[in-house]
Image (spheres, rainbow, N blue to C red):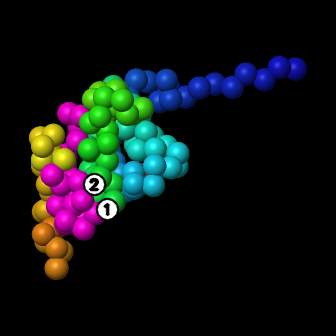
Amino acid sequence: MSTTCAIPNSATESKAPATVKAAILVLSDPKPGSEEALGRVFNALAAAYDFKNRGEEVTILFNGAGTRWIGQLSKEDHPAHALFEAVKDKIAGVSCGCADVFGGGDEAEQSGFELIKDNPVPGTTGLPSLQNLIHEGFTVMTF
């Protein structure tokens, strides 16, 4: 005896796709030049590319030692340069306070990126506000 399972009408009805908002934080440090660091930034950019190509809202921020990446990724011979160029329009900027500590602020500004400081952390020039991103409905991913 064969059993046939019915699919409820609600499961077959077309539903509007859920809106996704992704904030990608790059924290990895390019200085060591390790494959692990390159793997992190590559996957961060690849995730942003995926969201962008699917028409989802995505923003990329460089925090911590990750502020150093802009100078590296801007080089045409960098292995992730083409991917960087493909998502460049989704880069919100670089943490101002982190750039003060770890460097990379000059390269970011020369490349036309903003130094973000909407979270006035004491003793710093300010960092990006993750609370603002979450309040705006973004899911924060770190690489």
Cβ atoms at labels 2 and 1 below 8 Å apart: yes
Q: Which secondary structure lies at badge 2?
A: helix
Q: Residue at x 31, y 62 (%)?
A: 64
Horizontal and vertical percent for residue 58?
Answer: 28, 40
Amino acid type at image mark 2 = Thr
The stretch drawn in magenta includes residue 30: no
- Would you say 92 lies left or right of 52 here? left
Horizontal and vertical percent for residue 17?
Answer: 35, 31
Q: Quadrant of residue 83?
A: top left
In this view, 103 is above or below 92:
below
Q: Quadrant of residue 72?
A: top left
Q: Residue furthest right?
A: 1
Residue 64's disc number = 1
Report if residue 83 is visible in the image: no
Q: Residue furthest bottom?
A: 122
Horizontal and vertical percent for residue 9?
Answer: 50, 25
Q: Residue at x 16, y 79 (%)?
A: 122
Report if residue 85 is visible in the image: yes
What's drawn in magenta, residue-wise?
A: 87-106
In this view, 56 is above or below 96:
above
Q: Residue at x 36, y 29 (%)?
A: 77
The secondary structure that dominates the magenta segment is helix
Question: CA separation, marks 2 and 1?
Answer: 6 Å
Q: How many marks?
A: 2
Q: Which residue is mark 2?
A: 67
